Amino acid sequence: MRLTVTSWNINSVRLRIDLVLRVLAEQRPDVLCLQETKCPDDAFPLKALRGSGYEHVVYAGQKGYNGVAILSRFPLHTRDVMGFCERQDARHISAVLGPEAGGAAGIVLHDFYVPAGGDVPDRGLNLKFAHKLDFLQELRAWGGRRVSGPAILVGDLNVAPLEHDVWSHKQLLDVVSHTPVETEALETLRGEAGWIDAARHLTPEPEKIYTWWSYRSPDWSAADKGRRLDHAWVSPDLAGTVRKVEVLRDARGWERPSDHAPVTLTLEL
DNA sequence: ATGGTAGCAGGGCTA
């Protein structure tokens, strides 16, 4: 069977619920993982989703910031939320696909929103950068030496790890999201746990891949100063099932868009 | 350690 999982930093699920419904209707992924929902749990727009065909929803939100959610065509089991850095930030949620998912049953889905890290890439001068590095360190400790069983990890990891994951490697070496301390941390923790970077598995460097374009660029598409901040990783036993990773760049050009484009992973199980 | 835009909340923080 074919399984599709889309990851999208939506930057307010309430403001952009119509864009969520558009992606669900037009792309029809089996699972949609959202980040930056910016929505307390008691305000999650469940009613608007009713009738969309995605009746299985888990979410972990907070007022104003952060927030993650998983919407699924298939039943989800064992919603779990991990805390990092001794905060109650809503930056992770996971669930397991139920038996109704057929060949995909039992796959664990992890949805992450890694801290952006502020502007100054110095942990002594910038507490937000220190938080980001600490978060990555805890992610490394959580992954341990090897991820076991079929699992998918998606999300806005706020790091563009490779040279061709940014529009200019040289110009971004001291820009938060592409500094060596961040890119090495992310690649180290991914490698130690055995996760496969699905996009680069299929499309190695030097081809450019971007998933985010700043709001501050008036002509984002022509300038095309993008970064690959959004990722889809699979566990080793799913490596052979990866068929496609697609960035829906068009969505960045929709009216009142998120600054992130949806990224869709396709597996053949 | 420029400023540029956006969301939430209704000021200033976060991205």
Image (tube, coloured by chain):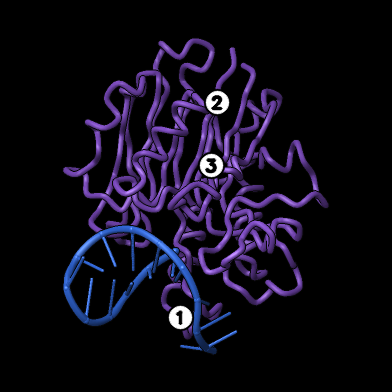
Chain colours: A purple, B blue
Task: Tell me the tag on residue A4.
Answer: 2
Residue A139, given in percent of the width and then of the height, sits at: 49, 53
Q: Name the residue beneath numbered marker 3.
A: A262
From the image, which quarter does the N terminus of chain A lie in?
A: top right
Residue A262, given in percent of the width and then of the height, sits at: 53, 42
SS at mark 3 in the image: loop
Q: Judge from the rendering whether residue A91 lies leftward or rightward of residue A217; answer left or right.
A: left
Looking at this view, is A87 or B13 the one in front? Answer: B13
SS at mark 1 in the image: loop
Residue A177, given in percent of the width and then of the height, sits at: 59, 65
Q: Residue at x 44, y 61 (%)?
A: A115
Relative to residue A159, is residue A93 depicted above or below? above
SS at mark 2 in the image: strand
Looking at this view, is B10 or A264 the one in front? Answer: B10
- Identify which amino acid the numbered label 3 is placed on: Pro
Please tell me which of labels 3 and 2 falls first in the chain: 2
Chain letter of the residue carrying label 2? A
From the image, which quarter does the C terminus of chain A lie in?
A: top right
Q: Quadrant of residue A31?
A: top left
Rounded to the nearest angstrom, the CA distance separating label 2 from label 1 is 38 Å
